[in-house]
Image (tube, rainbow, N blue to C red):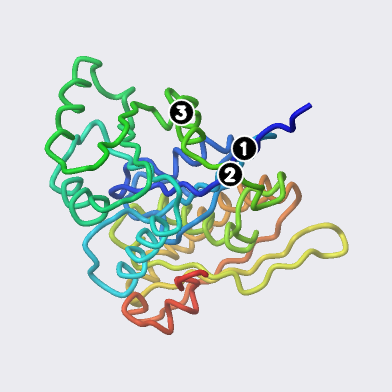
Amino acid sequence: MNEKIHKSGFAALIGRPNAGKSTLLNQILGTKLIAVTPRPQTTRNRIFGIYDREDTQIVFQDTPGLLEPKDALHQFMTREAERALKDADVAVWLIDSIKGVTARERGIATNVLSNLSIPLFAAFNKIDKINPDQIPALEKELEGFQFDPPPTKIFISALLGHGVGNLLRQVTECLQEGPKFYPPDQLSDRTQRFFVEEIVREKAFLQLRQELPYSLAVRVEEMKERENGLTAIRAVLFVERETQKRIVLGKKGAAIKHIGIEARKEIETMLDGKVFLELWVKVSERWRKKEDRLREFGYTETT
């Protein structure tokens, strides 16, 4: 009897901020792996999410939204997206169906995707938010780009899961025979500490809802399990100015308390156990423009 063929490869998720890349990866994995908020630029690092089946393993790379670099942090985020494409066997370009193909998409197509030598899928996301009659017009908007070969167009709702199975099947068809890169029960290449930082940052994004979140970084300084099974975590939220620190703390500490409560709930679910979470707020002036601070906060290029 012939052995079953096992396929494996890397798929890069590319697109503008808030196109739905992280939501799609969470849907594919069937769990909340990546922080998702209504604010653009929630994802800052390239994150591997591992989709594993008996005969297939696809390492999806969630990338920061592509935008014009304005500081050292933005430059790092752009390089992360470009490196994901360089390492990929397949590219999935997410386009927000509500916005359509705007100048931002045209820039991505011309400057990032035009010379790809790997299969490209144009995944129009959020189709649950548009009228089906709009789909032909969306398809036509891609005809002006010089892709060779042209991308495969797919319509999905990452939030609801519509069309995601079809996307997975077509991505799998593009992969070559190969072994598993990671153990079958591993969901990501990142550590628990990294995801604790992401959860705290997400809850701060949702609580503060201002320009401040782009000036916010989170670092876990201590994380250890005590003898009673409780995990004690001390994390620091870094901002760039004293005025921002006051915003994060809130009146009589109300804002940081709410962030801590919401973050602790999700961390306990992730760790499947009780958590003691201690949050501090510190000022690190102009950290987004300093290479040494970016490295300290984990915004360094991975190998």
Q: Helix, strand or loop at disc 3?
A: helix
Q: Which residue is mark 2?
A: 8
Calculate the distance from the C-alpha at mark 2 to the C-alpha at mark 3: 18 Å
Q: CA distance from mark 1 to mark 2?
A: 6 Å
The reply to whether dot 2 and dot 3 touch (C-beta < 8 Å) is: no
Three-letter code for the amino acid on which mark 2 is drawn = Ser
- Identify which residue, 242 or 129, lies in the foreground: 129
Of the two numbered discs 2 and 3 on the same chain, state the one appearing first in sequence.
2
At horizontal 55% and vertical 48% (from top left) the residue drawn is 59
Badge 2 crowding class, 10 Å Cα cut-off, few under 14, some 14 to 19, many 20 or more, is: many
**On screen, 161 above or below 295?**
above
Q: Name the amino acid, label 1.
A: Thr
**Whether label 1 touches label 2, CB < 8 Å:** yes
Q: Which residue is mark 3?
A: 164
State the CA–CA distance, disc 3 to disc 1: 16 Å
In x, y percent, where is residue 90?
Answer: 42, 45
Residue at image point 20% right, 56% down: 111
Q: Quadrant of the N terminus?
A: top right
Q: Residue at x 18, y 38 (%)?
A: 101
Q: Are marks 3 and 1 in contact (CB under 8 Å)?
A: no
**Residue that sits furthest to the right in the current view:** 227
- Pointer 1 local density, CA inside 10 Å: few below 14, some 14–19, many at least 20: some
Q: Secondary structure at mark 2?
A: strand
* Category of crowding for the residue at label 3, using alpha-carbon neighbours closer than 10 angstroms: few (below 14), some (14–19), many (at least 20): many
Q: Which residue is mark 1?
A: 56
Q: Which badge, 1 or 2, comes first in the chain's sequence?
A: 2
